[in-house]
């Protein structure tokens, strides 16, 4: 996935000279995960900037750059560090269009690795997407595989609104996948049916998609037909895909790494109850991080959604 | 050792509070320029006083008056080109008017209307910032873009003494100096952040000296002396345009009125202190100079005040008469294209509006 992300930025920078990349360690070092590897060498110091260590500064200056004609791709080194930039994201970037009644827009992309399971120090693994889906004006994209990552990132870069592009750290090098060499786009706001099924719908995004798909495949052998939907994008949200699947299966599980209470899963569950309540045969099940701070590495595997918890959830759904 | 006690504290001043100054320095300012500066400052003062009264009469919403700060605002704005960018906070009404904001639009803003938020095309003023110091970073980014594009424009961040305590101010100063971008940090040190006085805001003797730590030039100027402010700003702007990078200007001034119309300054400052600053009024000293040069009379003053009052009345009435907008409009400026769920919410509101229209 990291190569797909790198290629998307490289190809877009070749296409559009207004695109610049800025962030901590994104230049000489090519990013702590190598997402921006080689960009400085190819595009030079006028396009790729190692910034001072200041998250609010990175986002705040990106806003100024964007309103004056540039297309910045900013990197927040780990999503847990984004609290430092919350005002600039949620109160500034998100509202530029609104605050100027359409005179200005803020076409920036903020890339950030997120998610657990890789034994990081504190505040390096948090899934904080719900902070941004609760901030009107921002778009939130969360890819789950290399193909989607490239197509969605190119769409994000070409988008006229600020986009949070949250990359599951655990999937950066988790598996290889054929990705077309030429640039392509995947529209923001289109979910993908990862696996079709009739008995249960599993809704996931980002890091939990491969997990859900793996469990669904295993359940197939046990005679349970689970449908897996990868939302890919939380804002805008493809609720038509959700509703279509719910109407088919009548049983819904939502799986995300973020803490359960107030997580985006709650929003999905609310939408289903508003629009497809009478299609449900069972209460909606949410498998999520527990309502604690993200834990220490020695216990994170028991904290994160895992196969055992998902299987349990499916069994619960099937009891109805 | 870097000893802050040994830093020089020199205040740039050309016109003292009694309208006197070094004749050679004064000679550099034409009669025409002095008259323009005075007219603009008087216009700003009349508008400010009218807005304050109109708020008391319930005709506009909360308002943050700037009386006392006209020299800092007009003097700095006079040194800018129309294509330069301004990033104001909420007390920079005089700056914005100088830089092209129509007065009628400001009435839309203080009447709480969405239309008040949209600057006309070609007026390079960023929307009024509420979060203290957030705009300093936007100014740096904007200046950075100008530099990358090879355009000769400068960006100016306007903020107050309180803003210098914010993290964003620090990050903005640092980025500006590291990337050597054409931005001016223009601080109006009006001595108070709502009720908190300068001495509680920072242990730094001056704000201007903070520039040093970033590898930037800083300058302290008498913010009630429009000549000194203009001259200082002009030098900073010219240096930035030449590619010499950012500068921090601290304009020493005083907010004569309340923080906003919701504030009672008698709770935190003594009347004697206000009187001390009234004696340093930026308009009074320039008027003394104009009168000494035989350029200004009481009759001219009265005519100008009457003219501005008429202008205010006309702008207010035009704002009142124009279409006020409705709840339906708020959905149009969130995204370039409303996502389906948002569009549904707009439809819901429109249906309700239509129904109530039928009734």
Image: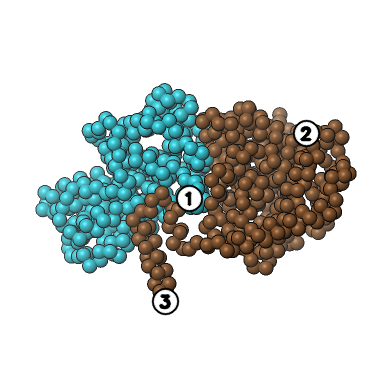
Chain colours: A cyan, B brown
Q: Image height check: is A68 above or below A203?
A: above
Q: Distance between the residues labelled 1 and 3?
A: 33 Å
Q: Nearer the viewer, residue A8 or A291?
A: A8
Residues indicated by labels 3 and 2 sit on the same polypeptide chain: yes
Mark sitting on residue B8? 2
Q: How far apart are marks 2 and 1 (CA)?
A: 47 Å
In this view of the protein, can residue A250 be seen by the observer? yes
Q: Which residue is drawn at 84% across and 48% down?
A: B296
Residues indicated by labels 2 and 1 sit on the same polypeptide chain: no
Graded by Cα atoms within 10 Å as few (under 14), some (14 to 19) or many (20 or more), the crowding at tag 2 reads few
Q: Residue under label 3, please give it.
A: B359
What is the quadrant of residue B229 in the picture? top right
Element marked by disc 3: loop
Graded by Cα atoms within 10 Å as few (under 14), some (14 to 19) or many (20 or more), the crowding at tag 3 reads few
Q: Distance between the residues labelled 3 and 2?
A: 72 Å
Give the quarter of the figure containing the C terminus of chain A: bottom left
What is the quadrant of residue A13 in the picture? top left
Give the quarter of the figure containing the N terminus of chain A: top left
User: In the image, is A136 to the left or to the right of A298?
Assistant: right
Chain letter of the residue carrying label 3: B
Mark sitting on residue A102? 1
Q: Residue at x 75, y 44 (%)?
A: B36
Labels 2 and 1 touching (C-beta < 8 A): no
Chain letter of the residue carrying label 2: B
Element marked by disc 2: loop
Q: Where is residue A314 in the image (x, y as percent from the top left)?
A: 20, 56
Chain letter of the residue carrying label 1: A
Comparing labels 3 and 2, the label whose residue is closer to the camera: 3
């Amino acid at each position: 996935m990291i190569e797909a992300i790198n290629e998307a930025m490289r190809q877009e920078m070749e296409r559009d000279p207004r695109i610049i990349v800025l962030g901590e360690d994104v230049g000489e070092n090519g990013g702590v995960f190598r997402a921006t590897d080689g960009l400085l060498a190819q595009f030079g110091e006028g396009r790729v900037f190692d910034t001072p260590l200041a998250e609010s500064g990175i986002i705040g200056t990106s806003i100024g750059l964007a309103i004056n004609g540039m297309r910045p791709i900013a990197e927040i080194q780990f999503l847990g560090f984004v609290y430092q930039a919350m005002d600039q994201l949620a109160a500034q970037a998100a509202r530029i269009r609104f605050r100027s009644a359409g005179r200005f827009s803020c076409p920036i992309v903020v890339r950030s690795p997120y998610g657990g399971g890789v034994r990081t120090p504190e505040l390096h693994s948090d899934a904080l997407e719900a902070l941004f889906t609760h901030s009107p004006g921002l778009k939130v994209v969360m890819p789950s595989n290399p193909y989607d990552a490239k197509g969605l990132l190119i769409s994000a870069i070409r988008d006229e609104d600020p986009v949070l592009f949250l990359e599951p750290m655990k999937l950066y090098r988790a598996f290889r996948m054929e990705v077309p060499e030429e640039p392509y786009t995947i529209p923001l706001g289109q979910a993908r049916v990862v696996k079709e099924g009739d008995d249960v719908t599993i809704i996931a995004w980002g890091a939990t998609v491969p997990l859900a798909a793996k469990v669904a495949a295993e359940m197939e052998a046990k005679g349970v037909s689970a449908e897996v939907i990868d939302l890919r994008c939380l804002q805008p949200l493809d609720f038509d895909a959700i509703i279509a699947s719910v109407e088919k299966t009548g049983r819904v599980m939502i799986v995300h790494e973020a803490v359960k209470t107030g997580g985006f899963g709650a929003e999905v569950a609310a939408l289903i109850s508003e629009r497809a309540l009478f299609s449900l045969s069972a209460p909606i099940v949410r498998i999520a991080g527990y309502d604690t701070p993200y834990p220490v590495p020695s216990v994170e595997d028991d904290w994160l959604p895992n196969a055992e918890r998902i299987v349990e959830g499916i069994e619960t759904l099937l009891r109805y | 050792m870097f000893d802050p006690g040994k830093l020089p504290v020199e205040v740039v001043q050309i016109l003292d509070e009694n309208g006197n100054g070094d004749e050679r320095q004064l000679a550099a300012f034409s009669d025409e320029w002095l008259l323009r500066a005075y007219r603009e400052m008087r216009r700003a003062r009349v508008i400010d006083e009218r807005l304050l009264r109109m708020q008391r009469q319930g005709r506009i919403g909360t308002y943050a008056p700037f009386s006392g700060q006209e020299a800092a605002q007009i003097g700095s704005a006079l040194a800018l080109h129309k294509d330069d960018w301004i990033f104001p906070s909420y007390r920079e009404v005089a700056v914005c008017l100088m830089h092209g904001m129509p007065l009628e639009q400001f009435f839309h803003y203080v009447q709480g209307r969405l239309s008040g938020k949209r600057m006309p095309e070609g007026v390079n003023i960023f929307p009024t910032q509420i979060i203290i110091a957030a705009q300093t970073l936007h100014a740096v980014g904007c200046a950075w873009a100008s530099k990358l594009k090879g355009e000769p424009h400068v960006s100016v961040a306007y903020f107050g003494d309180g803003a210098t305590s914010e993290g964003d101010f620090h990050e903005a100063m640092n980025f500006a100096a590291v990337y050597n971008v054409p931005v001016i940090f223009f601080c109006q040190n009006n001595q108070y952040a709502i009720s908190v006085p300068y001495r509680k805001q920072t242990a730094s003797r001056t704000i201007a000296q903070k520039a040093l730590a970033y590898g930037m030039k800083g300058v302290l100027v008498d913010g009630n002396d429009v000549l000194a402010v203009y001259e200082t700003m002009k030098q900073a702007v010219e240096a930035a345009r030449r590619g010499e990078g950012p500068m921090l200007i601290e304009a020493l001034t005083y907010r004569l009125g309340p923080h906003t119309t919701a504030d009672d300054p008698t709770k935190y400052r003594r009347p004697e202190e206000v009187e001390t600053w009234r004696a340093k009024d930026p308009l009074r000293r320039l008027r003394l100079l104009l009168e000494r040069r035989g350029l200004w009379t009481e009759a001219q003053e009265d005519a100008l005040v009457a003219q501005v009052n008429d202008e205010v009345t006309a702008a207010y009435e035009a704002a009142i008469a124009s279409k006020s907008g409705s709840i339906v409009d708020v959905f149009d400026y969130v995204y370039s294209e409303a996502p389906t769920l948002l569009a549904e919410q707009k439809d819901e509101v429109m249906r309700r509006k239509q129904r109530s229209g039928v009734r």
